[in-house]
Amino acid sequence: MARGSKGMKLGSTRSGGSGKARIFTVLLAALAIAFGSWYAFRVGPAPEVSLVTERPAVGRSNEVTAVFSEPELGLGMVRLELIQGERTEILAEEIFVPGSGIPFVGSDGTAQAVLEATVGTDTMAWLAEGEMVLRATADRASGPLRSAAPVSVERTLPVRLRLPRLEVVSTKHYGRQGGSGAVVYRVGEHVVRSGVRAEQVESPGSPRPGGVSNDRFAFYSLPWNVADSSEIRLFAEDDAGNRVEQPFLDIFKTMPSRTDVIHLSDAFFDRVVPAIASQTPGFDASGSLLDQYLRINRDLRRAELDRVVEFSRDSEPAFLWSGAFLQMPNSARAANFAETRSYIYEGREVDQQTHLGLDLASTARARVPAPNSGRVVFAGWMSLYGNAVIIDHGYGLLSLCGHMSTVDVAAGDSVSKGDRIGTSGTTGLAGGDHLHLEVFVHGQSVDPMEWLDAKWIRDNLATKLEVPIQ
C-alpha cells in the first residue's frame, strides 16, 4: 500500500504540471488574440494638415506648401491637389510604408511629411480667371482592419490673370541722376505694392492724404549710379504677383562726373582708427592701421548705410516737416554729393568710395540745427560718421548729421526745424571740423541740395502732393 500511495502522489504531480502548462498556453493564446485584436483595430490620432501659400491669390506663380503630421502611428498617404471647375490636378503625392508602432519591433512610421508645388499660369496655361481650390489630404497608417480615415484641408484662392490698373495723376516730372521727387498715381483694387523702381532700388508708395481710396503717392530716389532713364518706372503689383510698370518722367538729366582726391597719412590713421575701433563692438583690429582703415571705409560704410535702410522702413507715415531744409549757419560747402573719391597713401591709390552727402564747414564746434522737423530715431556713435543724429521726417525721408563733437538729443525726441541737436566736430573719419549732412529717401542717399531749395520743394513736391509742406 505504501508503494501504491507513493505512486499515486507521483502521478498527481505530473497531472498538476500538465494543467499549469495548459493554463499558461490558454493565457498566452488569449494574450495573442487580445494583442492581435488591439493591433488590428487600434486607431491613432487623426493626422494634422496645414496648407500655406506664398500669396493670397494666384497669378503667374505661387508657391504652395502642405505639412502633414501623425507622430503616433505615422502617415499612410499624403496628397496635394488643385481643383478648378471639373478639372482636378494632383500636384504631389507620397505613400509611406506603415511602421509597427511597437517599441523595439520593426520600423517607425513616417511621422511628418511636406509636399511643395508651384501653381500659376507660368506652368498651368489652362487656369481661368475666377477661383480655384487647393486640397491637402492625409491618411493615417492603416492595417487590415483599420480605416485610413483621411483628413483634408481646403483653401479657395482667387485666380487673377489681368494686370493691375496703374494711372499717373500728377504731371511735370523732372528728375536728375542722384536726385529725388514725388509722383501721384492711382491703382486698381487688389494692389498690395506700388511705387517707383530705379533699376533694383524701389521707393514704395503710400496712400495719398486727402485722396480717394486708390490714390497713392511716392517720394522716390533717382540713385546717383543709375543713368539709364528707361530703368526708372512706376509700378504696381497685386496680391497674385501680377505686376505692371510704366515710365513717368518727362525729363531726366544725367549728373556730370565729380571726383576728389583724399591723401592719407600715418598721423591721420593714428588719430581716427583707434578711436573708431575702440567704440565699434566686434571690430576686426588685426593688421596695420591701413588695413583697419580700409575695413572702416569699406565694410563699416556699407553696414552703416544698411542701418539707415532699416530706420527708413519704420518711417512714420506722416509729413513731419515743412519748407526748405536748413544748412548749418555760416557754413561753406567743402565737399559735394556723389563725389568719387580716390584715397592715396604713400603715392598709390588704396581705395575708392563715393561721398554721398554735403560737407559743411564753419567755425570749430559750430551749432548744428535740426535740418527740419521730425523725430530723432538715432543719436550716438556710427563708426565712420562718428557722433551722429538721424531724424525721421516721415514717409521714408530721413536726414543724417555726422562727425559731431557733441550730441544734444536722444532717440525718441521730437525736434522742430532749427532746434539745436549738437555741435560740429572731427569724430569718425573727419579730416577736420565740419558737419556731414546726408539726406535719404527710403534708405537711398539723394542730393541734399534739392532739399535745401525752397523753389525745388514747391515745384517738385508741394504742387504735386497738394499738402502744406512748402
Image (cartoon, rainbow, N blue to C red):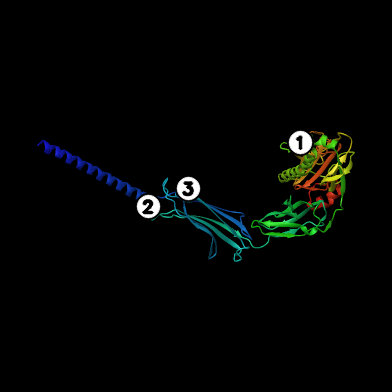
Q: Nearer the viewer, mark 2 or mark 1?
A: 1
Does residue 416 show up? no
In primary-sequence order, the first of circles 3 and 2 is 2
Disc 1 residue type? Ala
The numbered dot on residue 71 is 3
Disc 3 residue type? Pro
Q: Nearer the viewer, mark 1 or mark 3?
A: 1
Residue pointed to by mark 1:
277
- Indicate left or right for 307 with 262 as reference: left
Give coordinates of residue 371: x percent, y percent.
82, 41
Residue pointed to by mark 2:
40
Give coordinates of residue 412: x percent, y percent.
73, 37
Q: Secondary structure at mark 3?
A: loop
Q: Closest to the observer: 156 or 292?
A: 292
Q: Say few, some or many: other residues with alpha carbon within 10 Å of mark 1 (under 14 / 14 to 19 / 20 or more).
A: some
In primary-sequence order, the first of circles 2 and 1 is 2
Q: Say few, some or many: other residues with alpha carbon within 10 Å of mark 2 (under 14 / 14 to 19 / 20 or more).
A: some
